[in-house]
Amino acid sequence: MTSFLLFLFSLKVAFCSCQAENKRSGFRSGRAQYTVSRVGRLAAVVNESSGLVYRADRNTFWTHNDSGGRPTLYEVARDGALVDSMALPYLKNRDWEALTSQDSTALFIGDIGNNANAQTQLNIYRIDPKVPNQFQTITFQYANQQHFPATKDTRNFDSEALVFAKDSLYLISKNRSQPRRFVNLYRMPARAGHYAVLPVDSVFLKSMVTDAALSPDGRTLAVLTYGKIFLFEQQNQQIDFRHPTRCLRIPRGQTEGISFVSNTDLVMTNEKGKMYLIRRK
């Protein structure tokens, strides 16, 4: 992105609001219920953080770089300092955009970036950190995509948000279509195989989705966009958009990583390496 485009992007994020989503999707403004503080900067080797997952047993995070980066996961402390790294030489970072975990034995790396909506098959890798080279591959396609690349008014086959819940993986579309339409939620089994996915839910969000996370108790889904975080209550152990609660306006640049660190508090990263704690008052 050129300096001028970055300037325009920063202005757009700085002046974003929750008004459209509050009106059309039923959110309530929630910024007054949270404090936001900068808590660190990611190690220089993480030069374009695009996925984040909390390791509660170690009080650290796994993260990775965006497309073209090394196929490596980096373990960083709460202040962003590098703790360790895990090289994955048998994988390729075509466009790693998301990271989620089942537990301490299973990480899922979403090689799911699809900016041009031109990919006919996308990959998710299941990694056991103890034996990382014995990975499993999940492949999928969007069953309702008819054109490759998609036409501009249907460009909703890209995702940067991946969440594990129970025995399934959930994707949330980024929605690059013109004009903007609803973002879609997709579900697939969290095991090796090939799947053709269709939307299981949708919601109107004006901003493009860049990550998502589920609270440890499974009761809150946080969806990150440029400049905003949307919170959804989850009921009956289902992942859906049926119960929107809060929209938090938090303009902090090109934010692309988010993870819960408790049932109420989150850590967010942007592509410039800054880390922020979003804490419930």
Image (spheres, rainbow, N blue to C red):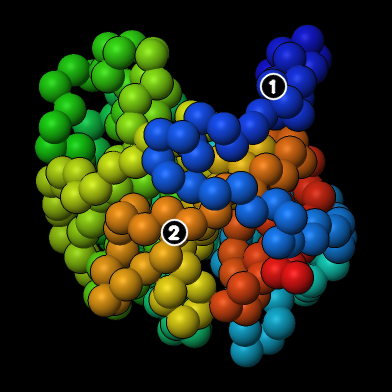
Most extreme residue toward the bottom, as rendered? Answer: 57
- Give the camera-side residue of 196 and 43: 196
Above or below residue 4? Residue 9 is below
How far apart are the two marked residues, 2 and 1, measured between alpha carbons?
A: 24 Å
Q: Which amino acid does label 2 sit on?
A: Phe
Q: Is residue 251 left or right of residue 231?
A: right
- Which residue appears at 38% of the width and 14% of the height? 179
Q: Where is residue 35 in the image (x, y as percent from the top left)?
A: 79, 61
Question: Which quadrant would residue 36 be assigned to in this image?
Answer: bottom right
Q: Which mark is residue 163?
A: none
Q: Which mark is residue 12?
A: 1
Q: Where is residue 32 in the image (x, y as percent from the top left)?
A: 74, 55
Question: Which quadrant would residue 146 be assigned to in this image?
Answer: top left
- Give the camera-side residue of 280 and 60: 280
Q: Where is residue 172 in the image (x, y as percent from the top left)?
A: 37, 46
Q: Is residue 94 left or right of residue 197?
A: right
Q: Can you tell which of label 2 and label 1 is closer to the viewer? A: 2
The answer to whether residue 181 is visible is: yes
Q: What residue type is labelled 1?
A: Lys
Are circles 2 and 1 on residues that touch, CB within 8 Å?
no
- Which residue appears at 62% of the width and 42% of the height? 228
Image quadrant for the N terminus?
A: top right
- Give the camera-side residue of 112 and 246: 246
* Number of other residues with Cα within 10 Å of mark 2, as a class: few under 14, some 14 to 19, many 20 or more: many
Residue at the spot of label 2: 232
- Which residue appears at 55% of the width and 54% of the height? 246
